[in-house]
Image: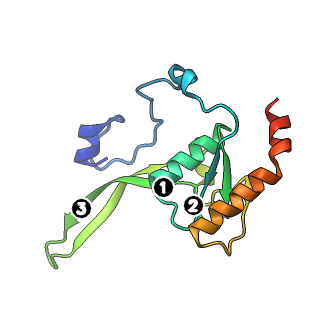
Amino acid sequence: MTERNIKLGPIQGKQGEVIEGTFNQLVPVDAHKGLKIPGRAYLLMGPLSYSSTILFLTSLQDSRQAVIAGHSNVRSCTTGRIETHVLSGSNLELTMPTLIFTRPSGKEHCQQPIEPDVYLSNQVINSNEAVEDLAKYITANRQTTINTLQ
């Protein structure tokens, strides 16, 4: 716990302690039932997927609200709420995260990459090519997807 984490919450504790806890949502997910995307949503991850994108990918994958496509190179957990400190002896600036966000399926997955539901070639670095490859996959599997949704 840092002074800032104590001030911002939502978990309370004493400064310097390491605390683990769940994030209690301010707005229950059930309140958004009318906002669900009809049909199947696909999310494309790539080598530049980072930070909040990881939170988005893992939460939608674990809740089975989206199909994750790409290749397995993105870690499953991410950090947040960074703090910066200047080291007095050298004036070097140290920036460090003070929170670790774990995916809904559990912290044991943090050391593992996100496993996509649909693998696209790891040779695809160009984002336009990756989108085209995903579009081809969706089109080729459209009937299977429709049957799965029914």
Looking at the picture, which amino acid does disc 1 mark?
Answer: Thr
Q: Which residue is mark 1?
A: 78
Q: For residue 100, which numbered disc appears in the image?
A: none
Q: How is the image coloured?
A: rainbow
* 16 sits left or right of 70 in the view: left
Q: What is the x, y in percent for residue 111?
A: 60, 60
Q: Residues within 10 Å of mark 1 (few under 14, many from 20)?
A: some
Q: For residue 75, which numbered disc appears in the image?
A: 2
Quadrant of residue 124 within the rendered picture: bottom right
Q: What is the x, y in percent for residue 44?
A: 61, 56
Q: What is the x, y in percent for residue 3?
A: 22, 46
Which quarter of the image is occupied by the C terminus?
top right
Q: What is the x, y in percent for residue 130?
A: 64, 65
Quadrant of residue 129 within the rendered picture: bottom right
Looking at the picture, which amino acid does disc 2 mark?
Answer: Arg
Q: Residues within 10 Å of mark 2 (few under 14, many from 20)?
A: some
Residue 102 shows in this picture: no
Q: Secondary structure at mark 3?
A: strand
Q: Are marks 2 and 1 in contact (CB under 8 Å)?
A: yes
Residue in view at x 70 percent, y 56 percent: 135
Q: Is residue 23 above or below residue 102?
A: above
Residue in view at x 24 percent, y 62 percent: 84
Q: Which residue is mark 3?
A: 84
Q: Secondary structure at mark 2?
A: loop
Q: Which residue occupies the extreme bottom position in the image?
A: 90
The residue nearer to you, when weighing 43 against 129, is 129
* 63 sits left or right of 140 in the view: left
Mark positioned earlier in the residue sequence (2 or 3): 2
Q: Residues within 10 Å of mark 3 (few under 14, many from 20)?
A: few
Q: CA distance from mark 2 to mark 1?
A: 7 Å
Residue 142 shows in this picture: yes
